[in-house]
Amino acid sequence: MINIAIAMLLGLIFSITFHISRGMQQQGIKTLTFIKEKIGKKQPTLFWKECKSTIYIWGVILGGSGIIWVILAGKFAPASFFTSMYGLGLVAMMWYSSKILKEKIDKWEFIGAGILIVGTVLIGIEGIFQTKLNYTDIDLESVWWIVGIFTVISLFALIIIRNHKSQVLKSVIFGIFTGGTVSFDPIFKGIGQNLNHNPGFLPASSSGWTIFLLSLAFTTTAFWVTQWGFSKNVRAALLIPMHNSMYIGFPILIQLVALPGYKISYITVLGMLLILAGNLIMKLDEARMPGTTKLS
């Protein structure tokens, strides 16, 4: 129980720092725009007084630090306990947008945040009372089958709908693919760390390292497919909720199939439905406005 609580705490830290880093990057982009404007007016020195010109770089560094929290969590518990905290970072991002970026937060964002918090708490409560679990006993063959089937079907769907006229359909499919793909990152890191019943903060065998490093391919793929999706005019307000929900939910599905002793109840199902609903409600106003691409 203590190990699971530690993994969830690390997931919370990761989620908060990751989402705050996106806010910092958004702030940095605004800073760069301000700089260009000042230079255009031949006043290049003013922005040093009015803006923090390195905010974007610090945002990138903070976002990149996520790998540390993933590796630390993989030593203590299965990936689903780490990823289950991901939604709470949206609440941190909402605070940052309001207090730092001075953006208006509407009632739907507050309502969605509350629902998301309840869903996350429900998953957390059930997770804490799970028996001691780690990836030392996971059925790797089942994991490969799930990953392979998901990749083939979702890639086929992406190819079919890439030029579809419906932005909603495209946004949902892209969100499912990117969220599912990036969720393989903590799963494969955890498997690599615990392979051959030899758990550690880093893999202890060449096969463990191979699986561990393969996780980077999933993260990279998810990033570039997201950019491809935006080039196809998918709507971030629809893609992001699907992405986040898949990132939280897919590890639960994989563990349910491949990890002996892992069980879920109606509480987990209810928590997942609330997380999906909270994500969607937080983006409700943006979803009504085509072309919205906020980083949050």
Image (tube, rainbow, N blue to C red):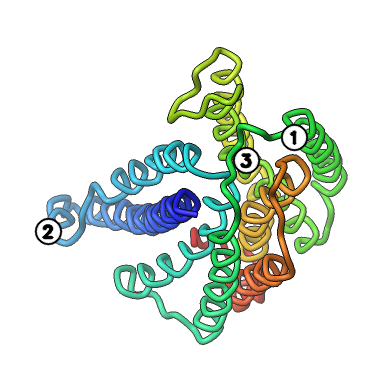
Is residue 46 toward the left or the right of residue 207 in the image?
left
Q: Nearer the viewer, mark 1 or mark 3?
A: 1
Query: Where is mark 2, residue-wise?
Result: 49
Q: Can residue 15 be seen by looking at this rendering?
A: no
Looking at the image, is mark 2 or mark 3 earlier in the sequence? 2
Q: Secondary structure at mark 1?
A: helix
The quadrant holding residue 206 is top right
| Residue position for label 3 | 222
The disc at residue 203 is none
Tell me which amino acid carries mark 2.
Lys
Residue depicted at x 57% and y 61%:
129
Q: Crowdedness of circle 2 by 10 Å Cα count: few (<14), some, many (20+)?
A: few
The Cα atoms of the two marked residues, 2 and 3, are separated by 38 Å
| Tags 1 and 3 touching, CB below 8 Å | no
Image position, residue 152 (x, y; %): 83, 35
Q: Splitting the image into 4 quarters, where does residue 57 fall?
A: top left
**Mark 1 is on which residue type?**
Val
Front-most of residues 238 and 293: 238
Q: Can you give x and y, in whole percent of width and height, for residue 69 in the image?
A: 41, 43
Helix, strand or loop under label 2: helix
- Which residue is at 45% across, 70% downward? 91
> Label 1, on which residue?
143
